[in-house]
Image (cartoon, rainbow, N blue to C red):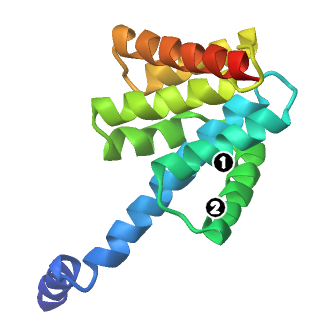
Amino acid sequence: MLRALSNLFESLSPARAPADTAAREHALQLATAVLLIEVMRADGEVSEEEERSVLQALRSRFTLTDRELADLVELAHDRSENTHDLFSFTSKLNEALDAAEKAHVFELLWTVAWADGRADAHEEHLLRRVADLLHLRYADAIGAKLRAEAAAREAAKKT
């Protein structure tokens, strides 16, 4: 009984809160990075534009040093190659993010899909599955897709 109370107080103590917060943030970063890499690899071709887009998406979403970003991407590549389950990653986003934040991440995923100037059928299929797993409203999912497509077309005009 005393041990149970002690464990309860330990779990509520402020000293543990930062570690728990850091662990949750890392899980969120990893889940996002894996999904970005899954989109990048979905069409079977990985372009330099897509690789840059993944890095830019992670930089825009999280505050990471160059070293932290490199480590995150390396770990995400490993997880992406060894895990064939989107649910474990989308569930982390569902636990941590509200609808608007999930829609923003979804737009980043579409940005990667459009980074090479086109969205392949495999990328579209993957993103439809992710939208379902994130419980995105149809309007939010389509809005994210259209914004990413418009941004890609605008960027293509400038080059």
Residue 73 in percent (x, y) is at: 69, 55
- Name the residue that disc number 2 marks: 69
The alpha-carbon separation of the residues under discs 2 and 1 comes to: 8 Å
Q: Quadrant of the C terminus?
A: top right
Q: Quadrant of the N terminus?
A: bottom left
Query: Residue under circle 1?
Result: 55
Q: Is residue 51 visible?
A: yes
Question: Dot 2: within a 10 Å radius of its alpha carbon, few (fewer than 14), some, or many (20 or more) residues?
Answer: some
At which x and y percent is residue 52? 73, 42
85 over 150 or under it: above or below: below
Residue 90 position within the rendered picture, expressed as x and y whole percent measured from the top left: 48, 37
Residue 111 lies left or right of residue 70; in this view the side is left
Q: Are marks 2 and 1 in contact (CB under 8 Å)?
A: yes
**Disc assigned to residue 119:** none
x%, y% of residue 140?
Answer: 36, 16
Sequence-wise first label, 2 or 1: 1
Q: Quadrant of residue 149?
A: top right
Dot 1 alpha-carbon crowd within 10 angstroms: few under 14, some 14 to 19, many 20 or more: some
Instruction: Indicate the amino acid at tag 2.
Output: Leu
Element under disc 2: helix
**Identity, as a three-letter code, of the amino acid under mark 1:** Leu
Q: Is residue 25 above or below residue 53?
A: below
Frontmost residue, 44 versus 63: 63
Quick one: SS at disc 1?
A: helix
